[in-house]
Image: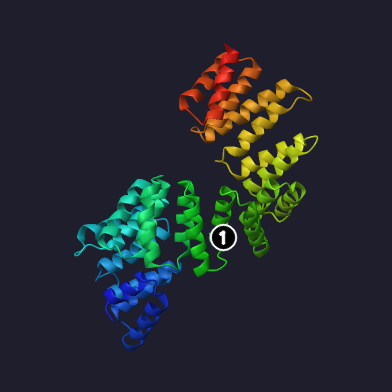
Amino acid sequence: MTTQNLDALLKAGEVDQARALAEDALRENKDDRPALLTLAKLATVEGEWERAEELVKRATRGGKDNDADSLLVQAAVAAQRDQVEQARSLYEQVIRTAKPPRAEAHFGLGYLLASLDDFAGARKAFEKAVELEPNVAPYQFHLARMCFALEDLKAALPPLEKALELNPLYPPVYVVWGTVLQHLGELETAEQVLRKGLELIPGHPEILNVLGNVMVALGNVSDAFAITQELAKAFPDDADAQGNFARMLMATGHRSDALAVCRALADKGLATAQSKTIEAMVLESHNPPDFEGAAAAYREAMKLDPTGWGPANNLGNLLLSRQDGKPEEYVKQAIEVLEEARRREPARVEPVLNLALAYARQGDKAKSKALASAVVKQNPEPELREQAERLLKTLG
């Protein structure tokens, strides 16, 4: 059994067969190089770094007989140990020297760059891997992921389709494809893709979760509710499943039940920014509103997600709406949290518009005008633009 044959099995996802053949080869010859390198690659996937290194040393006689295959394993081990520069150097060495070119080196480099949030660089590397070996499903799938990360949604569709053709039993393809189609507004097609996935992989939670989101977007509340409820029952300690169920309960008017789900998560130490935001929104909807409870929940959500703008924006709105006590103090606090929301997500229009309203309430017309004008220049959706224009007219 050659290295190429064993690699072909690994690329096709036939991991068990590749492992069995490699182990059989080692029983016949304890120094079988292709077998040792195959088991080393499997060890890297399974997180057994020391075993991977030991197998590579055996295959290369302590590093004396390095080649592209052994360097690729060493690069993978370095990457998983966060030895970024070493991993990058090894991948680039294989890219420069291997004859014929090795798609695995481009794929490994792409994976490394993606982990560093260099999505453009990763996309180029995955494109090269796909060019060299177009019939490897993971290469196609990760190229699609980078297109999605770069918001080039239509470019993500062909590699997703090819990845699914090559491996129809790989759940992440359905998840990403369904999400891309939803972002493109192709909701019916997204539903078809996701339901096809569930026919082949029944009850898969991530596919079900995306399907639930699509059903909400389609206005099919009953199906969406059933899906989120099913996932919540199946995964009682999964914060995302419980949070999505709480969101659906709140959206369908079951506010007390939604609050109970959120507080149960908090009692288990599983509260998330989503669950705390839902808790705050339910408390805010009480009659009369529970301002203190809602504000505390929003602040907790801000801590749980230090980069999310939504809870800060919501808290700013809550403070601006409060009229009891000292309204001027609430306006001051609102400005502070809305400035934080804008810092977290400068491109979002909502915090900027709310800040304009807050500064107008505080009497700072210059800042209010500047912010409202910035909103108009961003040309947001009509409702937000109209609010900004009305504010500018009021301010004169």
Nearest the camera: 82 or 61? 82
Q: Is residue 373 left or right of residue 238?
A: left
Nearest the camera: 203 or 110? 203
> Quadrant of the image for the N terminus?
bottom left
Q: Is residue 358 above or below residue 284?
A: above
Q: Disc 1 residue type?
A: Leu
Do we see residue 58 in this rendering?
Answer: no
Do we see residue 221 in this rendering?
Answer: yes
Q: Is residue 98 left or right of residue 260?
A: left
Q: Position of residue 167 (x, y in %)?
A: 40, 67
Q: Is residue 369 above or below residue 2?
A: above
Residue at the spot 61% in from the left edge and 22% down from the top edge: 357
Q: Position of residue 220 (x, y in %)?
A: 61, 52
Residue bearing mark 1: 208
Residue at the spot 34% in from the left edge and 74% down from the top edge: 9
Residue at the extreme left of the image, as rendered: 99
